[in-house]
Image (cartoon, rainbow, N blue to C red):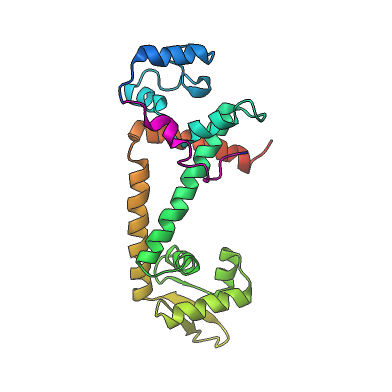
Amino acid sequence: MHGDGREHGEGREHGAGRQHGESRQHGEDREHANGREPGRARGGCDCGRGRPEVAAAIEVEDSVDRHIARWRHKAPFDERVEGIVTRIQMLTKHLRQVKGRALAEVGLQAFEFDTLHRLASRGAPYRATPSELATELMVSPAGITGRLDTLEEAGSVRRIRGTEDRRRVDVELTESGRARWTAAMKLLDGAERAMVEPLDEIDQDELIALLKRMLLRVENPA
């Protein structure tokens, strides 16, 4: 039942009429009515109590708060877990949209960018065999051939025959291809920085550690 993005923005009318700076007393009355202690965040979290900026953010309603409220008492779920997972999903959706806009701006399709990205990650002279690229990108030999044909026609890659073994073919990232990849990366970097900008370095370090703990559990299940 995790939010899939369709609910983003739904229910906005419920919170739009609230004035900024609504009295603390009113907020505490609502919390008492909902069975929560005054000052406790939605889901019962005490996180960030010592940091005004964190506490202020907790008090602001977002689309996931509305999603959780909509499903409360209608399905069995843990509100803390739902809040974490659904926000991760929403941020992931945002990044997909950002990537799509960035690639469109530099005239790349997603599969083209991914292929150039693999070549760029190898460092100079930015070469790989078609079979290596197919393995890394998890596509069939026929699929990688089609990708490389498109990129070569656009001047983003070139195929180079081996001097000693004429059967060997290397794919090399051209200057033009690297320039297009770099332009896309700069756009993506700017968008990602903007998304993380509300967090200071302490917040970022804490978030990295928390996400890492979650990922390690997924990658190394007990």
The x, y position of residue 8, in whole percent, is: 48, 42
How many numbered marks have been drawn onto this rendered protein structure? 0
Q: Is residue 158 visible?
A: no
Asked which quadrant contains residue 131, the reply is bottom right
Location of the C terminus by quadrant is top right
Residue at 35%, 53% (x, y): give it.
Answer: 189
Q: Position of residue 37 (x, y in %)?
A: 49, 11
The residue shown at (50%, 67%) is 111
In magenta, the rendered stretch is 2-19
Report x, y in % for residue 15.
Answer: 41, 30
**9 in magenta:** yes
The relative height of residue 122 versus residue 206 in the rendered view (above or below) is: below
**Residue depicted at x 51% and y 13%:** 33
Question: Would you place residue 87 above or below residue 119 in this image?
Answer: above
Residue 69 placed where, x, y %? Answer: 54, 28
Asked if residue 107 lies in the magenta stretch, the reply is no
